[in-house]
Amino acid sequence: MRLNRRTLIAALPLAAACSGATRAGVLYVTPDGDGGGGDWNDAANISDLDGLVSRAGPGGEILIAAERGPYEIEEPIWVGDGGRAGAPVRIRGVHSETGASLAAQIIGDRSDDDVGTDAFRLERNADHLHFSHFAFTRIGNGCFHAAAPLRNLTIEDCTFEDIYRFVENTASDENAAEIRGFAIRRCSGRGVERGFLRIRYASNHGVIEDCSAVGVPAEGDEVLPAGCALDDRAHDIIYRRCVMENFQQWRAGDYWNGDGFSDEPDNRAIVYEDCIARGSTDGGFDCKSRDVVLRRCVAEDNKRNFRIWSGHALMQDCVSRSPNFRGAAEEETSPCHIWIGDEHARILIERLTIDEPSAETALFEIDYEGARIDVQGLNVQAPRENWGDDAEQVRSQVRVTR
């Protein structure tokens, strides 16, 4: 836990309440709380969260009053303790009179010229935590920022607006900050500058379900937006029913970035199911990971709807609609439905639908002559099939079984 004048002062009544006491099961927080947290009349402050987690103990709960006003922060809320396997500590917004789940509002200090503070900063030993029912506004690099190695993190039922990033995974004083076992469910919002999430290091065994985010365009080449970004050696991660929209980079010279979903070459065992990428200035799905799998995914209104860099990939029942080349006046590139970028690629595509009302955009663009694509079932809804400027070469590389 990081100590400053405010937390030291707030900790005095908390320490008194803890003296000689056993670990409590349920503790209480209000916006103006300055007590020990034993009940709503003696509620603690949200800046005391680290100590409250320690007191609540495995299987305990910390209830955050949602209807009594917002929680305004100018620095992260540090947490460096947790529960245990099978007995997480739950931290959730509630109505203090009824106990019903209700989103507690966390307001940061983000401004037009400042990224702003992150909200919950999770440090070493903040394992087995379950957060739910928060509404974030004006938050910087992470409504949830995993800054050290963690185990079993769950985030559910949150909203956000005007943020830099919802989930960040970057070490502070550690060499790495992998998350082993995580779930992010039913979180959505808009006004996102950089991305919904970035998962890094050797983070593994994660699921992201029923989440959505809408980006705001970034001007110039300083910020590279990506709705969901995997990096380093993250592996065994599945996305289900997630929607990433409008992650765009404008006026960035001869290449405008901005992806809906992205993964990198050292990632592996990445699966996308029933996901949608819409309105990106680069790839809807920009997949470089080994043996990536996309099932029933839809990409539309992106410069290149599906970008597959991997040597091996599987696409099943996917749909590509109406690529949109927003940077045509500046960029030295071209739009397409399916782009293949590995010299020795062997890609299997089962039951692909391409919807191209104008027939002006190429179905496939393949950077290397050695790549081979096996399409088992192709439905092209277009006035004609456009195989691009190198149609003969492309057709020789794409084997289509209708």
Image (cartoon, helix red, strand yellow):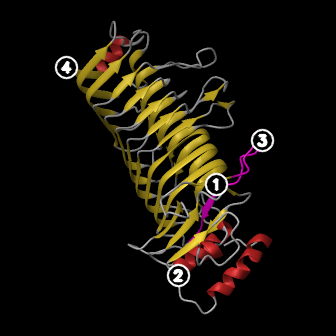
The residue that disc 4 covers is: 402
Residue at horizontal 65%, vertical 64%? 77
Q: Label 3's element?
A: loop
Residue bounds of the magenta highlight: 108-124
Q: Residue furthest bottom?
A: 20
Residue at horizontal 66%, vertical 49%? 139
Q: Does residue 121 belong to the magenta stretch?
A: yes
Disc 3 from disc 4: Cα separation = 54 Å
Question: What secondary structure characterizes most of the magenta part?
Answer: loop
Of the numbered discs in the image, which one, if any, rests on residue 24?
2
Please state which of the two labelled residues, at mark 3 or mark 1, is closer to the viewer: 1
State whether residue 396 is above or below residue 216. Answer: above
**Amino acid beneath label 4:** Arg
Q: Is residue 202 left or right of residue 139?
A: left
Question: Does label 3 or label 4 sit earlier along the sequence?
Answer: 3
Label 1–label 2 contact, CB within 8 A: no
On the image, the x and y values in percent for residue 359 come to: 39, 9
The residue that disc 3 covers is: 113
Question: Does label 1 or label 2 sit earlier along the sequence?
Answer: 2
Q: Quadrant of the C terminus?
A: top left
> Circle 3: is it few (<14), some (14-19), or many (20+) Cα within 10 Å?
few
Q: How many marks?
A: 4
The residue that disc 1 covers is: 106
**Amino acid beneath label 2:** Ala
